[in-house]
Every structure is written in structure tokens, then in C-alpha cells.
Image (cartoon, rainbow, N blue to C red):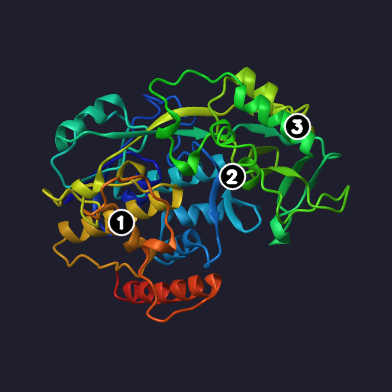
Amino acid sequence: MKVTVIGAGLAGSEAAWQLAQRDIQVELWEMKPQKMSPAHHSPDFAELVCSNSFRGDRLENAVGLLKEELRRCGSLIMECAEATKVEAGGCLAVDRQGFSALVTQKLREHPNITIIEKEATQVPEGPCIVASGPLTSDALSNAIGEYFGAQYLHFFDAAAPLVTAESIDMDLAWWQSRYDRGTPDYINCAMDREEYTAFVEALTTAEEAEVHGFEDKNVFEGCMPVEVMGRRGFDTLRYGPLKPVGLTDPRTGKEPYAVVQLRQDNAAKSVFNLVGFQTHLKFGEQKRVFSMIPALRNAEFVRYGVMHQNTFLQSPKLLDQYYADRRNPLVAFAGQMTGVEGYVESTASGYLAAVAMAAKVQGKPIPEFPQTTAIGALGLYVSHAGIENFQPMNINFSIIAPLEQRIRKKAEKNLAIAQRSLKVIEELTAGGI
């Protein structure tokens, strides 16, 4: 039996790997490098077009739990992320190019995977998993719309700029992780009140690049452009990406008024990204405004931020908890186009869609990932028919089944939920999922 997987992003790469590991022949379709979207720069699979961070790694954090579940389930993406990780305090961040290159190598070398370097323009009859992502080509996007006979929803995503390490003024910046958790892996660039005031004024009045159909209300909250966030109020950035809490400026011994954090973007520590600085300002404006950050006054930008359309389905009306078409269980979808948001969440959707598809084509029972697990909870959220105003969702503890007993302290409660979840995952893996 052969299964077609369309798209070699995070979800598609994970799906292809899981199917192939179960002795299923896979045709993995990827339009790169024959055709590139505006946000893609590399011919490799699993390209990280926004941040290089897979976010928090602690079990008290929902995404940390989701990552641990995937690790225990034999996730390709988690394996490659661990092999190419760079220091990032309590987060899992990777060498962007090294990570994608490793995923590509693993998939190309797998004997059960055939790579088709061609744009898919139709939804296959099945069995298939469509994981073409939020940057789906117009032809395939139209085909998916025709397949469902339903209207797409749209929002817009943004990537942060990158600067060279040698251009950062370390006389005005310092290394520290918030609350000194883990090793000091972030470069912190402080601003006093006067500097912050001038920065916010310049940021919120800077000229934006033209993005067809863009409206602030269509931006997903987790990828809010920094200038849009700044327009929400003077202190909004100080409670968001410029939050100074947990940091101490060694020049003053005090907490700064505002802090811009930079995170390592490659293993050589030669390139850093501005954390939380997704933007769609014009390139010249990015240079002008972001150079107002004192430690970045002479910054060399190796990539400016970009804004691109991000498309997702009304999944609660269309898909089941295994990301399959309710009308045809041999046609499934995965990744951000289903309404999961984030690298790890996309990976989890590809994993679950593939595990379920493998069981279907091999005539085996579909493994049940209950709502007590992060993997299962995410699939159940995406397929919950009772959701009226469906929006992309990061994994969070509120969609995971609550504990039967009450625990007052949030961290202790989250850890207990995580421990319960990992017991379920242990039982599933022991059963040979």
C-alpha cells in the first residue's frame, strides 16, 4: 500500500517518516526547489520560516509536555531538533539550516520514501495526507477549496529580522536568561524610558510594506507583528516581547525599563534573531527603527522581517480527531492549515494523522490518544464541532482534560497533568503504536 504525503514542512516530514517507519511506501511531494513561496529561502525540507525556537522545554509548560510526548513516540522532528539544538535557556532552539538539512537527509535516505519534486495541484483520492502548510500554492489552495466546497479562512504571519553577532554593541548589552534559568543564552538590549518612548513612537508610525488584504484583526495573536502590538498601547510591548521582568542590567544592577532579547539562530553563534519582532515594516524602516535600540545602533541585518499570508481550514466542520476528512477517512490533512499553531503543534498533527492513516491502510485498530494527552487534546480541539469562531491554537493546558483532584499551585497542577499524560503515552508506546 502506498500513501501520498503532500508537503515536506514539519507536519509533512513527520507524517512521511511515521508512515515509512511502519513499512508503508510513501510518495512525498514537495514543490521546492522547483517553486518557492515568498517566505521560503532554502530547498531543504522542514524549513523554519519564522523563529528557530520550538519554545519552552519544561513539563510545567504545555508545549514542553507536547515535545516530550513526541520524543517518546519516536518523532523525527524532535530527534533532529535535539541533534541540532543551540543554547536558548529553558527553550529548545535549533540551528535553522542544520536542522532542515538533517531532516532532509533522513527522509531522502529512507528506503520507503520516494521524493517527488513537483507542485501538487489536486487533492489525491487517498490514501493521502495533505500537509502543504499555511503557504499552500494558489493552485492547490483552490483545489482544496473545491474539494471541501467550503470557504477558507485567512490570517497573516510574520517573521523576525536577523542580525550578525559581531554588529551587536556588547558594551550596551549582556548575556542572561530570564530569572537566570539555565545558562545565560540570550543577549539582552536595554532601553530606558526615554529611549523606549522614542522607539514606540517611531515603530507605530513607520511605513509598512504593502500586504494584499492585510488587516490587523486578521493577525494571529501568537505571531502579532511588533508594530501592530505597539499600537495597542504604550506599555503593551513592555508586557510582551520587551518585558524586563527577571533581568538585571549589570551596568546599573537594576531591572531595566524595557529589554529587547536576541536569541542565537545558528550553531556558530554568528547570527541572532530579535525575539518577538515579527514585522511587516518596509526594509528601510526596519533598519531605521530597530537601529534605535541602543545596542543595535550599528546592527548588520542579514535578513529583514517579512509578512506572508497564512491559510487554515474551518477544521471543526471538516475534520475528525485524527485530522481526517469526516467524509473520507483516507484523506487527511496536517499542519498549520488545520488550525494548529506552532512548530511543535504542526509536528504533532503530522504524527497523529500518520499513525491513524497507517492503522487504516494496514487494517489495524487506530491508537486512541485521549484528551489526557497533549497530542490527543490538540486533535480534539481542532475537530470540536461546537467551536463557532474557530481560530488557530497553540497547545495549552486548558484544552487538556483537567485533573480529578484540585491542586492550587499552577506549576504543581501542570506538572501533575504532564505526569498523568506521560503515563498514557508510556502505555501506548508499550502497545506498539
Mark 2 element type: loop
Residue identified by numbered label 3: 296
Q: Identify the residue at image location x=54%, y=53%.
A: 55
The amino acid marked with disc number 2 is: Asp
Q: Nearer the viewer, mark 2 or mark 3?
A: 3
Mark 1 surroundings: few (<14), some (14-19) or many (≥20) residues within 10 A: many
Q: Identify the secondary structure beneath mark 3.
A: helix
In the rendered image, is residue 168 in sight?
Answer: no
Q: Which mark is residue 95?
A: 2
Residue 229 occupies quadrant: top right
Q: Which mark is residue 381?
A: 1
What's the distance in space between the residues labelled 2 and 3, CA to CA? 22 Å
Mark nearer the viewer, 1 or 2: 1
* 3D distance between C-alphas at marks 3 and 1: 41 Å
Q: Are marks 1 and 2 in contact (CB under 8 Å)?
A: no
In the rendered structure, which disc, 3 or 1, sits on the residue that comes first in sequence?
Answer: 3
347 lies left or right of 353: right
